[in-house]
Amino acid sequence: MSVRREPGVEARQQLGWFKANQWLLARRATQLGFFMLFASGPLFGIWIAKGTLASSMTLDVLPLTDPLVLLQGLVAGHRPESLALIGAGIVLGAYLLIGGRVYCSWVCPINPVTDLAAWVRRKLDIKKGWNLKPKTRLWMLGAILVAAFITGTIAFELINPITTLYRGLLFGLSWGMATLLLIFLFDVFVTRNGWCGHVCPVGAFYGLVNTTGLLRVSARGRQRCDDCMDCYAICPEMHVIAPALNTADAGDSPIITDIDCTACGRCIDVCPERVFNFTHRFDQRVDQPPAPNTMTARSRLVTAA
């Protein structure tokens, strides 16, 4: 079995290991930081945030509630407390401002697991898999709301991998670890980016919230693209890239506006030509094309070899 070259090799050679992984490292630090907000109490007796990502109280003054949890409660016929409404409003407002699917790549504790599964899948050169419909996760979102309505409970939270993982890590419950293993195996052997990209109803919900966010990835340097395809190989939602890279029409926006984009920054990291960068949704700047005699990073590496 042939082994495909890992995306980002040229970026690491050209820019150095740290710069070719800077946004990956930033995401891992952020995910660990969110976890430690909740873990500091059970582990060290310092209660910064009490609860989980579903619902919490930070420093005994700031309520935070997952809007999807609140929505399930409303569908189930529950009357939410005022703190829950305030907490959901704060969280929803933040993601409407920043971008909904930032949650998926910068906050969700499942993301490192699915990233690892994607890396293993590339190493094993597994190219084929179950071809799930793009709207599957929206159907899953509808299904958990129907389940809440029928049962009169927030049923999904009993099996939600995000919630069960936090309970497992904080309180030693094995169910969360078992769910994690199933997601890992599903992503490696069944379908590429299976859980986050095709199944997760939480990601579907935050995708619907991802229409107004200011934080965006721009292919501002698309004129420098040398078609190495590393950005497509590394992106968990690779269909979002093509429109921003389109140079056929000077009026085409360089901004990735697709609601599926998680703003993970991996396309920025692995590109030696620095085609991509973080910016805001109104930034339409495009770099001028390089001079005809200017070598790309790929050309420089080939010449040096």
Image: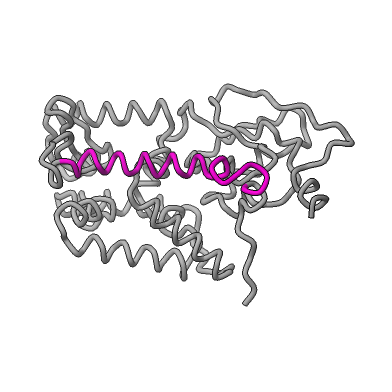
Magenta part, dominant SS: helix
User: Looking at the image, is 156 positioned above or below residue 243?
Assistant: below
Decide if residue 166 is on the left or right side of residue 295: left
Residue ID at (45%, 62%): 117
What is the total number of numbered labels drawn onto the structure image?
Answer: 0
- Residues in magenta? 12-40
Q: Quadrant of residue 266?
A: top right
User: Looking at the image, is 71 positioned above or below residue 169?
Assistant: above
Quadrant in the picture for the N terminus: bottom right
Residue ID at (35%, 54%): 140
Q: Most extreme residue toward the right, as rendered?
A: 293
Residue ID at (35%, 50%): 201
- Magenta-colored stretch includes residue 22: yes
Q: Depth check: 44 or 157 in front?
A: 44
- Tell me residue 42's x, y (percent): 13, 46
Decide if residue 198 is on the left or right side of residue 286: left
Quadrant in the picture for the C terminus: bottom right
Decide if residue 82 is on the left or right side of residue 194: left
- Magenta-colored stretch includes residue 267: no
